[in-house]
Amino acid sequence: MELIKTSRGYKIVYQGHMYLNIDKPTFLTLNNDHVHKENDNLVGAAKVKCLMIEKAKSSHATPSQIYSEIFANCTTNVLAELPREDYLKRSIRDNR
């Protein structure tokens, strides 16, 4: 189980599924199975976005430098789940 911190709160990742709208992250018990398959690429994209925001807050690099640094280390499946480049760069600028 992993926690991903976003501007709107926490997302909990458990076995490839992402749980949203968690006010206070606590341990959960799941009583039934999911009706859809897990999406590891979507989870990876959420982690990449979180990493970009953290780098933007801690470094003085330009949004293009941060984007290209992260872009080089991502798989093509994760990149397919990410928003467009200009949207990501805008979110980097907004979170400084």
Image: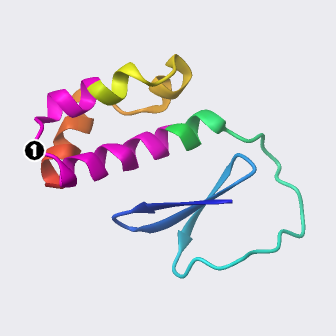
Please tell me in which quadrant of the rendered image residue 24 appears. Answer: bottom right
Q: Give the range drawn in magenta.
A: 45-68
Residue nearest the viewer, comparing 70 with 39: 70
Is residue 96 shown left or right of residue 38?
left
Q: What element carries label 1?
A: loop
Q: How crowded is mark 1: few (under 14 residues within 10 Å), some or many (20 or more)?
A: few
For residue 47, above or below residue 19 = above
Identity of the amino acid at label 1?
A: His
Residue placed at 20% from the left, 54% from the top? 57
Is residue 61 shown left or right of residue 84?
left
Residue nearest the viewer, comparing 11 with 51: 51
| Location of the C terminus (image quadrant) | bottom left
Please tell me in which quadrant of the rendered image residue 60 appears. Answer: top left
Is residue 61 shown left or right of residue 45?
left
For residue 77, above or below residue 31 = above
Residue 89 locus on image (x, y percent)? 20, 36
| Location of the N terminus (image quadrant) | bottom right
Residue furthest toward the right?
A: 32
Q: Does the magenta stretch include residue 82?
A: no
Residue placed at 20% from the left, 45% from the top? 92
For residue 89, above or below residue 25 = above
Residue nearest the viewer, comparing 9 with 53: 53
Q: Does residue 96 appear anywhere in the picture?
A: yes
Residue on which the image places disc 1: 60
Residue placed at 89% from the left, 63% from the top? 32
Residue placed at 48% from the left, 38% from the top? 45
Residue 20 locus on image (x, y percent)? 56, 63
Counting every numbered tag in the picture gives 1
- Main SS, magenta region, reads helix
Is residue 42 shown left or right of residue 26?
left
Residue 73 locus on image (x, y percent)? 43, 24
Q: Does residue 84 appear anywhere in the picture?
A: no
